[in-house]
Amino acid sequence: MEGLTQIGEFETRLRRSISVAWSVFAQKVGQGLLPINKEASMQLHYAYVLQQMLPLITFRATEYAAVEMEAGVPLPQGTREIDILVKGESSEGNHAIAVEMKCYKTFASSGGKRGANDIFMKDVYVDLQLLEEYCRLGHANQGVCLVMTDYRSFVYPRKKDAKCWDYDISHGTRVHDIALNTPIGGKDISIHLAKRYEFSWEQVGEYWFTELEGEE
């Protein structure tokens, strides 16, 4: 038997649970069973799905897993709250996975067009940088970024002639060991990603979903 039911390293099962919960979440949102108005509701609904799944991947009395939302951790630039911190304990040791989440809807919860496409694209890269920092500083062993949108042009753009495409999140984009400093919104930017990433989007209903984890 493979997947989550395979009794193997606990940290492997813990990591897989994040992906399976994301797949379940995507299906429920894409099929209209979970209404997502903004990023906060995305985080809450996903955390609930993940919380229900974690007991199913603990197979020994020594294993324990839990979800902590908005977990505060110290960074050189000040305290930062991780969207979701998945904590696991077993006889193999402790394992923590930081999860950052991003949601962009064409229309805001107020009903008006959201705009600020460039800021969202840049913020996805900011989250990836934060996840690398969490791991480097020992706040997490792994970092995962979960992104959803109903804005097709992010995924399949007709052209990439605007400066925001320095922060390319379109399907098939691959980045590795890059430094980005293109100003967005009139603000200076300094982003460095050491790891390797590939944007692979999956469509469910009117939404697209992607899961990103850096590779060395």
Image: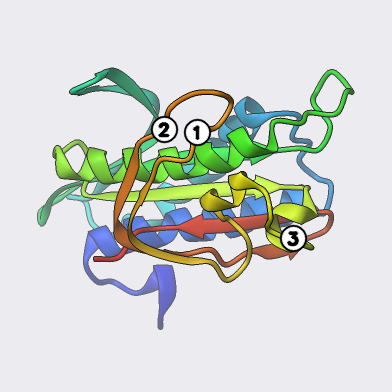
Give coordinates of residue 55: x percent, y percent: 40, 48
The quadrant of the picture occupied by the C terminus is: bottom left
Residue 87 sits in quarter: top left
| Above or below: residue 154 compared with residue 140 | below
- Distance between the alpha carbons at the discs numbered 1 and 3: 21 Å
Q: Which residue is mark 1?
A: 183
Q: Amino acid at mark 3?
A: Pro
Q: Residue at x 69, y 55 (%)?
A: 161
Element under disc 2: loop
Q: Which residue is mark 3?
A: 157
Q: Which residue is mark 2?
A: 189
| Above or below: residue 131 compared with residue 160 | above
Front residue of 24 and 81 = 81
Q: Which mark is residue 35?
A: none
* Badge 1 or badge 3: first in the primary sequence: 3
Q: Nearer the viewer, mark 1 or mark 3?
A: 1
